[in-house]
Amino acid sequence: MSLQLAPLADSSVPWPPSVEEFFPPGLVGNWVTKFSIMVWIAVAVIIVFFLVTQRNPKIVPNKAQWLGESVYSFVRNGIAKEVIGHEGPRFAPYLTSLFVFICFINIFAVIPGFQISPSSHIAFPAVLALISFGLYWYQGIKKHGLGHYIKTSVLLPAPWWVQPILLPIEFAQILIIRPLTLAVRLFANLFAGHLILLVFTLGGFMLWNAGNIALAAVGVISWGMAIVMTLFEAGVALLQAYVFVLLTASYVQTSLADEH
């Protein structure tokens, strides 16, 4: 066994993986990182995309205009109107921007040279979740008033002697649990995907350099699995963008509900 593992120890493949394999270090101190550059690229591409596709709108759209309108219509009709209702279209611009932005930053996870998504860092999903819940709280307070909104959101139809137990739970749910789960869901799925791709890719290199034909063959299989999981990760990246926006619309709908 020691003879078989000797080439592994002498291999130039970095093992075990360092923290840089998960979160790349800053390019210019801590101010300019690989993550921030990806976010800037995503924002620039989105702005250019909508400027190009909608710069000269026509009744009969060309292919570029049709593509831009299809993205907006998908979110407006499929999420905003379906989930929020007749008030949904006024939230469609925000939901569309959120959907397209998350799609772009998520898809970096499978692009060679990047191979990691900013969503794999909890800070980015956390900020997006706080923005969405800022909208959720603002709309609820704007429509129902602060006192009535808090009363109907926190106080449940239960006996008065149960309220001291329920009040902390409901406050925690509205202020902490819901935003936290919204952020963690996006973060965990993208981080897990990055971790799986890293395991299969580095595992293939380690097995290939193990100095054993059988292990080298398994290493090739590991690389094949990395390719399969890359395609799977691309689907998960788009799906998680949809789920995040869908849940945001659902929360906004509850803040506008007449039951408040």
Image (tube, helix red, strand yellow):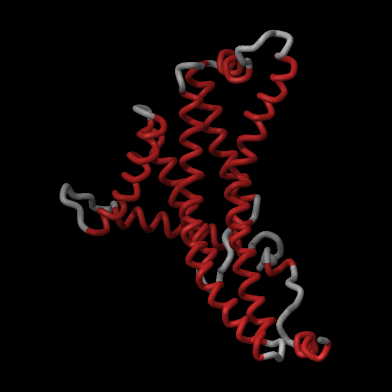
Q: Left of 127 or right of it: where is 240?
A: left
**Residue at the extreme right of the image, as rendered:** 2
Q: What residue is shown at x 69% (from left), y 66% (from top)?
A: 25
Q: Is the residue 216 above or below the residue 201 in the image?
A: below
Q: Residue at x 73, y 72 (%)?
A: 17
Left or right: 229 as drawn, with respect to 121: left
Question: Dividing the picture into quarters, in which one does residue 44 lie?
Answer: bottom left
Using the image, determine if residue 149 lies above or below residue 65: above
Residue 94: percent from left, percent from top:
44, 40
Q: Is residue 127 above or below residue 19?
A: above
Q: Residue at x 69, y 87 (%)?
A: 209
Depth check, front residue: 8 or 257: 8
Instruction: Give percent across and percent down for residue 250.
Output: 48, 33
Can residue 28 be seen by looking at this rendering? no
The image quarter in which residue 194 lies? bottom right
From the viewer's perspective, is 8 left or right of 76?
A: right
Question: Is 256 located above or below residue 89 in the figure?
Answer: above
Answer left or right for 4 relative to 222.
right
The residue at the point 58 percent across, 57 percent down is 190
The answer to which of 166 and 219 lies nearer the viewer is 219
Residue 239, can we see it?
yes
User: Residue placed farthest to the left in the image?
Assistant: 60
Q: Nearer the viewer, residue 85 or 3?
A: 3
Q: Quadrant of the N terminus?
A: bottom right
- Point out residue 126 in the picture as x, y percentages from the top left corner: 62, 45
Residue at the far top in the pictured view:
160
